[in-house]
Image (cartoon, rainbow, N blue to C red):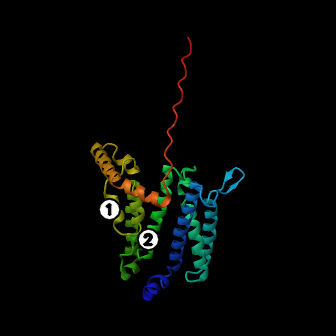
C-alpha cells in the first residue's frame, strides 16, 4: 500500500489532483444534502438572500475556483501550497458544477427536469478525474511506449487522431463518449464510427438526404434511451434528489368572437 501510494500518487505529483477530487466530491455531496434539507424544510439551513436577490452557491464557487486556480499556477507541484490550492479549487468546482444547469439555461432550473444535467456533469467529471488518477493520460496517449513518447511525430499524430475522433463523436451528439475518449484510447473511435444521434450536427449535415440512415439512427437512439434512461434517472435521483413534477401550462382562454 505504501509503495503504491508513493509510486502512483506522490512521485508523479498526483496528490494535489487527488485532494482536489476528494474536495470536489465532498463539496457536491454536502451541498446537495443541504439543498435537499432546505427543500424539505428541515434543519437550520436557509437560502441566502440579499434583499430580494437569491445568492446561488455558484457565486462563492466561482470565487473559490479563481483563488484555487491562480494559487495552483503559482505553487509547485509538490509544495504544500499546491495541496491547499487543490482543496480550494475542488470545493469551488463542486459548488459551481452543482449548478451547471443554471449556468447552461441561465435560469433557476435546480429542481426541474433540466437540473439533472448538473448531476450528470458532476458524475462524468468525477469519472474522468478517477481515470487520470489511475494512469490514463488525457488525449489518449497512455498507450505509447517511452521511445514513442520521444518521437514527436508519433506523439503528435496520436494526439491529433484521438482529438479528431473525439470531435467527430461530439458532432454526432455523443458528449460522454467524446469526453471519456479523450482519456481512454479507442473509446472516441467507437463513437466516431457509429451512427450519429438524431438532431446532432452530424445528422443534420450528413443524414439530410439519407432516409435509411436517419431511420436507423432514430431506432438505435430509441433502443438506447429505453434501456438506459430509467436506470440513469434513478441514479441521478438518488444522488441529487428527485425533480419537481412538471406543471402543465394553462391553456389561454378562447376569446369570444367579435360581433360583426
Describe the element under mark 2 as helix, strand or loop: helix
Q: Is residue 20 above or below residue 179?
A: below
Looking at this view, is 217 or 226 the one in front?
226
Q: Are marks 2 and 1 in contact (CB under 8 Å)?
A: no
Q: Which residue is mark 1?
A: 190
- The image position of residue 44, as x and y in percent, is 64, 61
Residue at 64% x, 65% y is: 63
Residue 13 in percent (x, y) is at 50, 81
Where residue 88 appears, x then y in whole percent?
60, 72
- Residue placed most toward the observer, 103 or 209: 103
Q: Quadrant of residue 35?
A: bottom right
Q: Quadrant of residue 27?
A: bottom right
Residue 80 visible in this rendered orientation of the protein: yes
Q: Residues within 10 Å of mark 2 (few under 14, many from 20)?
A: many
On the image, numbered disc 2 is attached to which residue?
Answer: 138
Q: Residues within 10 Å of mark 1 (few under 14, many from 20)?
A: some
State which quarter of the image contains the N terminus: bottom left
In-front residue for pair 231/13: 231
Instruction: Residue 157: tell me if it is visible.
Output: no
Please tell me which of labels 2 and 1 falls first in the chain: 2
How many numbered marks are there?
Answer: 2
* 190 sits left or right of 167 in the view: left
Residue 161: % across, % down: 37, 66
Amino acid at each position: 500500500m505504501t509503495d503504491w501510494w508513493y509510486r502512483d500518487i506522490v512521485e508523479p505529483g498526483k496528490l494535489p489532483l487527488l485532494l482536489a477530487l476528494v474536495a470536489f466530491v465532498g463539496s457536491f455531496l454536502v451541498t446537495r444534502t443541504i439543498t435537499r434539507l432546505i427543500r424539505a424544510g428541515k434543519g437550520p439551513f436557509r437560502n441566502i438572500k440579499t434583499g430580494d436577490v437569491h445568492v446561488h452557491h455558484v457565486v462563492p464557487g466561482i470565487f473559490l475556483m479563481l483563488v484555487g486556480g491562480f494559487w495552483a499556477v503559482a505553487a509547485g507541484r509538490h509544495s504544500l501550497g499546491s495541496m491547499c490550492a487543490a482543496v480550494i479549487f475542488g470545493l469551488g468546482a463542486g459548488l459551481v458544477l452543482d449548478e451547471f444547469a443554471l449556468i447552461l439555461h441561465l435560469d433557476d432550473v435546480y429542481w426541474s427536469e433540466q437540473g439533472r444535467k448538473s448531476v450528470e456533469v458532476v458524475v462524468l467529471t468525477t469519472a474522468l478525474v478517477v481515470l487520470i488518477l489511475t494512469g490514463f493520460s488525457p488525449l489518449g496517449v497512455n498507450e505509447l511506449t517511452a521511445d514513442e513518447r520521444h518521437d514527436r511525430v508519433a506523439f503528435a499524430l496520436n494526439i491529433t487522431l484521438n482529438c479528431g475522433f473525439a470531435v467527430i463523436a461530439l458532432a454526432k451528439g455523443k458528449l460522454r463518449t467524446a469526453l471519456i475518449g479523450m482519456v481512454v484510447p479507442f473509446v472516441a473511435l467507437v463513437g466516431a464510427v457509429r451512427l450519429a444521434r438524431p438532431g446532432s450536427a452530424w445528422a443534420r449535415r450528413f443524414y439530410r438526404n439519407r432516409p435509411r440512415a436517419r431511420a436507423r439512427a432514430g431506432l438505435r437512439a430509441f433502443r438506447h434511451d429505453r434501456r438506459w434512461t430509467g436506470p440513469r434517472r434513478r441514479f441521478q435521483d438518488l444522488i441529487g434528489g428527485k425533480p419537481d413534477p412538471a406543471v402543465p401550462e394553462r391553456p389561454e382562454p378562447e376569446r369570444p368572437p367579435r360581433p360583426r
